[in-house]
Image: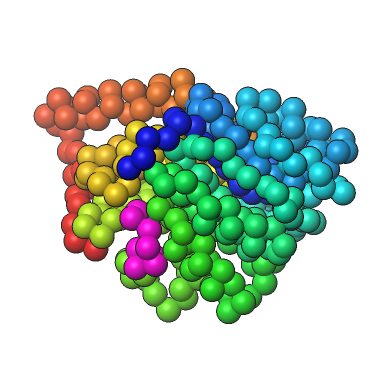
Amino acid sequence: MTEMPRAVCVIGEALIDIVRTSDATTELPGGSPANVAYGLGLLGVDTTFLTHLGDDERGRLIAEHLAGVRLAAGSQSAARTSTAAATIGATGAASYVFDLDWSLPADASTPPARVLHTGSIASFLAPGADTVRSLLKAAEAGTIVTYDPNIRPSIIGSRDDNIGRFEAMASLASVVKLSDEDAAWLYPHLTVDEVLPQVLALGPRLAIVTLGGDGSILATRELRVQVPSARVTVVDTIGAGDTYMASLVYSLLDIDPTAVSEAELLGMGRRAAAAAGITVSRAGADLPTLAEVEAALEALAESETELETDPETETAPEPEADQP
């Protein structure tokens, strides 16, 4: 693999989340790729973000929020900054309504980076999606391409109109991450266990499906592990998948997805679960810092050690790898 800078470039939409609860309405920076870029910045990663912001109050709010992330040239050329209205239900789950404009300059480019990430609406909505695919195709040899479709049917339309777009993007990726809802929407006649090899057959070396409170599954063509979710009290789920994705990208700075081991898969999954657990335990897309993730992992290791040394406590078996 060609040696690349220990850096990440994220391509995708940034917008303002208008969050409505029974108590109040607030406006906060959001968008799945923006959240991933922001999360990587909090993890101390050298991150560049190629996006489409307006030179308006909302656009400036996003730029200030992403202070630890470098905005790529041409990222502030939109006529207006996009929005997503999120309504939080009684269970803490969010539903969305979008007002989104997505495009990129014709001369858009990405800097050399160890990982190039994209996903969500940016990979489906014209005209920007076509530019995103071109940028992925032009990625330098040695770049790890990660993709999270983060399906939003209310914006992108029907499954039949978009399955081809998803599979074209996935075929350019080294790593694909789906939620269980994404998997069911893309492949409604397949189980999660059947979706994983389906995605791997498109070309990626690593496929992941997150299962909400039931954890996540990470699979290559040779290995499969299941990792439990963190045990936390859920406040809301905004940003959970983006936190998980940012953590995966962080891990991939030091892991080769073409030759990943069982221990590495488990470590990636456990770190991502710990990070996502922090986010869902707080209101909004409040992603964790590196110190917070490390502290959560340390606490988890200590609790597992206590269970192992207590003869009166039964411990749950560790996830095992098996054939996909």
Which residue is painted at 22% across and 40% down in the image? Answer: 263
- Which residue is nearer to you in this view: 123 or 86? 123
Q: From what the image shows, is residue 218 above or below residue 188? A: above
Q: Is residue 245 magenta?
A: no
Please give left or right for residue 130 compared with residue 298 in the image.
Answer: right
Q: From what the image shows, is residue 222 above or below residue 160? A: above
Which residue is painted at 63% across and 25% down in the image? Answer: 68
Q: Position of residue 66 (x, y in %)?
A: 67, 30
- Which residue is nearer to you in this view: 275 or 245? 245
Count the marks: 0
Q: Position of residue 76 (x, y in %)?
A: 79, 40
Please name the colour scheme applied to the rendered image: rainbow
Which residue is painted at 21% across and 30% down in the image? Answer: 307
Q: Quadrant of residue 129?
A: bottom right
Q: Quadrant of residue 98?
A: bottom right
Q: Position of residue 122 (x, y in %)?
A: 64, 55
**Residue 316 seen:** no
**Rendered-image quadrant of the C terminus:** bottom left
Q: From what the image shows, is residue 152 above or below residue 145? A: below
**Rendered-image quadrant of the N terminus:** top left
Q: Residue furthest left?
A: 311
Q: Which residues are magenta?
A: 199-208
- Which residue is nearer to you in this view: 26 or 250? 250
Q: Position of residue 59 (x, y in %)?
A: 81, 38
Q: From what the image shows, is residue 110 above or below residue 214? A: above
- Which residue is nearer to you in this view: 301 or 44? 44
